[in-house]
Image (tube, grey):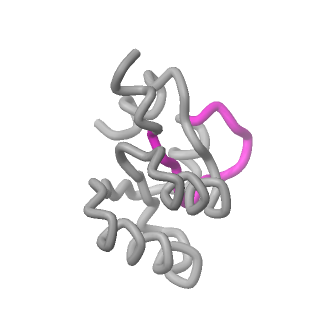
């Protein structure tokens, strides 16, 4: 389900640094995290999402998440920006 949501989103923020910056700026509606990503990568984002009361969805595969984003490599974290909900 979440892979489809990512595929259909007109805008997405891919990568831990970009997602963290977007969270800090209040630009994120939802965060999708791959459960097979290293926790040292995802833990800071999960913590910040809890602090900001953001919806976090977990998917099983970095590879599938990357593919859903249209990239050739795996993605540990993807965020759907607030603008996606308005489109």
Vertical comparison of 11 with 32: above or below: above
The residue under the point 52% across, 61% down is 24
Residue at horizontal 51 percent and vertical 21 percent from the top: 10
- Image vertical order of residue 4 relative to residue 17, above or below: above
Quadrant of res 20: bottom right
Single out the residue that lies furthest toward the front: 25
* Magenta-tinted stretch: 69-80
Q: Residue, x 45% and y 39% (percent of image)?
A: 80
- Quarter the C terminus occupies: top left
The residue nearer to you, when weighing 19 against 42, is 19
Q: Quadrant of residue 82?
A: top left
Is residue 78 shown above or below 47? above
Residue at x-position 53% and y-position 70%: 37
Q: Position of residue 79 (x, y in %)?
A: 48, 47
Residue 13 is covered by the magenta coloring: no
Q: Is residue 48 left or right of residue 37?
A: left
Q: Position of residue 61 (x, y in %)?
A: 47, 56
Q: Is residue 56 left or right of residue 39?
A: left
Q: Check the picture and name the quadrant holding the N terminus.
A: top left
Find out whether residue 71 is within the magenta segment: yes
């Amino acid at each position: 389900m979440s892979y489809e949501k990512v595929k259909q989103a007109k805008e997405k923020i891919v990568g831990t640094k970009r997602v963290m910056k977007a969270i800090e700026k209040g630009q994120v509606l939802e965060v999708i995290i791959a459960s097979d990503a290293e926790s040292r990568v995802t833990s800071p984002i999960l913590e910040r999402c809890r602090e900001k009361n953001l919806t976090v969805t977990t998917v099983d595969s970095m590879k599938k998440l990357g593919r859903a984003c249209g990239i050739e490599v795996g993605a540990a974290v993807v965020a759907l920006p607030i603008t996606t909900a308005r489109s």
